[in-house]
Image (tube, rainbow, N blue to C red):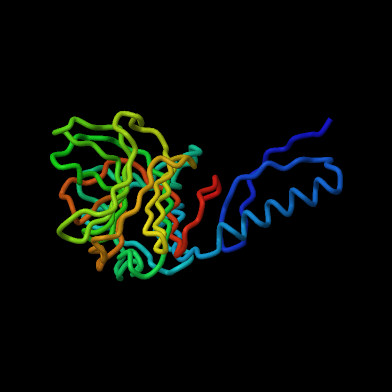
């Protein structure tokens, strides 16, 4: 009988980390096929990776050098989705957030290239007045990922990614209301395909929303990159964020992102 061993591989290839299942005592052909699969997964998930914040005790961008600084206080180090302490950041909704000291990715305006944003999030859905509150990842007033709650609907338990040109919304990809409980880790992946003007949102590797947009570009993203807040709202995100990656291409979400 094949002995199954679970171990965590920390890859040195472009600092891209992942969890893999290794099989001991495989036949030679099976071993080669498995190693080929691992290598291709690591290579594919690192091509086009331009910014990566592991958030493992600091806010350093280990790929693109776009480090983040604490603003209006200090976000708290917290446990990640595996329960390891000090390997994610908690935002208390009271003022503290992270921001880059330099301009965030220029291609976030929707006119330069395709892109992908991958992030893990765990937080609250406090109801807001216009649906633009509690954004956990954003740039300027033109891009946001959020745990959506709208008191006028009412709507809560919705995961959403959107863009804005400063005066009118454009991309709006989100799940139906009431599907996602609070205080649960979710892997959100938002992609923008500039060739087809298609925006797509995945949650936990499942496609949940997709559509053709782009009529109101460029989006108002000429600003710093932020975690824990957005320029669109004075109401700050309450929850945890971990493993934020940005690609300059469309990449299909995999569990190692």
- Is residue 247 visible in the rendered structure shown here? yes
**226 lies left or right of 4:** left
**239 lies left or right of 243:** left
- Is residue 57 visible in the rendered structure shown here? no
Residue beneath the point at 28% across and 56% down: 143
- Residue 241 percent location from the top left of the image: 38, 46
| In the rendered image, the vertical position of residue 126 relative to residue 214, given as above or below | above
Which of the pair 59/122 is nearer the observer? 122
User: Count of labels shown?
Assistant: 0
- Residue 50 percent location from the top left of the image: 46, 66
Which of the pair 61/84 is nearer the observer? 61
- Residue 78 percent location from the top left of the image: 39, 43
**204 lies left or right of 231:** right
| In the rendered image, the vertical position of residue 236 relative to residue 4, given as above or below | below
Q: Which image quadrant for residue 123?
A: top left
Q: Which image quadrant for residue 25?
A: top right
Residue beneath the point at 39% across and 63% down: 194
| In the rendered image, the vertical position of residue 251 relative to residue 26, given as above or below | below
Residue beneath the point at 48% across and 66% down: 63
Q: In which quarter of the image is the N terminus?
A: top right
**2 lies left or right of 48:** right
- Residue 179 percent location from the top left of the image: 35, 29
Point out the residue furthest to the right here: 28
């Amino acid at each position: 009988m094949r002995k199954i061993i679970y171990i965590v591989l920390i890859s040195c290839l472009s600092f891209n980390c992942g969890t893999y299942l290794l099989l001991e005592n495989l036949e030679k052909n099976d071993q080669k096929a498995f190693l080929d699969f691992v290598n291709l997964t690591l290579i594919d998930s690192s091509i086009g990776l331009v910014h990566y914040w592991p958030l493992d005790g600091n806010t350093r961008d280990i790929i693109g050098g776009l480090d983040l600084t604490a603003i209006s206080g200090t976000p708290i180090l917290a446990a990640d989705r595996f329960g390891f302490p000090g390997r994610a950041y908690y935002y208390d909704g009271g003022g503290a957030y992270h921001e880059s000291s330099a301009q965030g990715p220029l291609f976030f305006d929707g006119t330069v290239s395709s892109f992908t944003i991958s992030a893990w999030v765990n937080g609250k859905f406090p109801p807001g007045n216009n649906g633009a509150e509690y954004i956990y990842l954003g740039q300027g007033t033109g891009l946001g990922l959020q745990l959506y709650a709208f008191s006028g609907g009412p709507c809560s338990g919705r995961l959403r990614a959107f863009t804005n040109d400063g005066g009118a919304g454009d991309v709006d990809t989100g799940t139906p209301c009431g599907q996602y409980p609070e205080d649960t880790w979710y892997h959100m992946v938002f992609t923008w395909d500039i060739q087809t003007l298609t925006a797509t949102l995945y949650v936990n590797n499942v496609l949940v929303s997709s559509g053709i947009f782009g009529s109101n570009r460029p989006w108002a993203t000429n600003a710093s990159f932020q975690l824990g807040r957005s320029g669109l709202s004075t109401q700050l995100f309450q929850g945890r964020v971990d493993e934020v990656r940005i690609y300059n291409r469309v990449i299909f979400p995999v569990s190692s992102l």
